[in-house]
Image (spheres, rainbow, N blue to C red):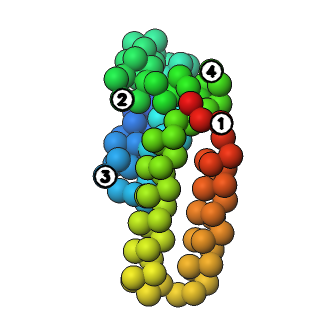
Amino acid sequence: MQYVWATLGLICVGLAAVGIALPLLPTVPFLLLAAFFFARSSSRLHHWLMTHQTFGPLIVDWQTSGVIRPGAKKAATISVTAVFGLSILLALPSHVLIIQAVVLGCVMIFIWTRPNG
């Protein structure tokens, strides 16, 4: 089972890395999942992720206090706006835009109602 957890953690880190370049894919939720999986599989991988210069502080902030740093909130907002703007430019069907607006709106409400780190 340890290998399954580690594999899931590595997949999540990979998806998070892709999410850095693609605004459609969220980065932080995948990193939080990776931390969860690594905690159950590999102390070495868990330590690497938790002490990572860029990602570690975001994960620690969330795990200890449930906070999201203002810079991360702004980056998420820019990404969500870019994705929705691209959808409009691509002239996606109105039902897709409505679903996307509702889901992305809920995500933004969740993010911006979390305390600042």
Query: Which of disc 4 and disc 3 is earlier in sequence?
Result: 3
Do the numbered discs 4 and 1 sit on residues whose CB atoms are within 8 Å? Answer: no
**Circle 3 is placed at which residue position?**
21
For label 4, the crowd category at 10 Å Cα-Cα, with few meaning under 14, some 14 to 19 and many 20 or more, is: few
Query: Which of disc 1 and disc 4 is earlier in sequence?
Result: 4
Do the numbered discs 2 and 4 sit on residues whose CB atoms are within 8 Å? Answer: no
- Taking the spot 52% from the left edge, 46% from the top edge, the residue there is 73
What is the CA distance from the residue labelled 3 to the residue labelled 4? 27 Å
**Circle 2 is placed at which residue position?**
54
- All told, the count of numbered labels is 4
Residue 41 location, x and y as percent?
50, 19
Rendered-image quadrant of the C terminus: top right
Query: Which of disc 1 and disc 3 is earlier in sequence?
Result: 3
Do the numbered discs 3 and 4 sit on residues whose CB atoms are within 8 Å? Answer: no
- SS at circle 1: loop
Q: Nearer the viewer, mark 3 or mark 4?
A: 4
What is the CA distance from the residue labelled 3 to the residue labelled 2? 15 Å
Residue 112 falls left or right of residue 1: right
- SS at circle 4: helix
For label 2, the crowd category at 10 Å Cα-Cα, with few meaning under 14, some 14 to 19 and many 20 or more, is: few
Instruction: Indicate the quadrant where residue 48 lies.
Output: top left
**Circle 1 is placed at which residue position?**
115
Do the numbered discs 1 and 2 sit on residues whose CB atoms are within 8 Å? Answer: no
Residue 111 falls left or right of residue 90: right
Query: Which of disc 2 and disc 3 is earlier in sequence?
Result: 3
For label 1, the crowd category at 10 Å Cα-Cα, with few meaning under 14, some 14 to 19 and many 20 or more, is: few
Amino acid type at image mark 3 = Ala
- Taking the spot 65% from the left edge, 36% from the top edge, the residue there is 115
Rendered-image quadrant of the N terminus: top right
Amino acid type at image mark 2 = Thr
Amino acid type at image mark 1 = Pro
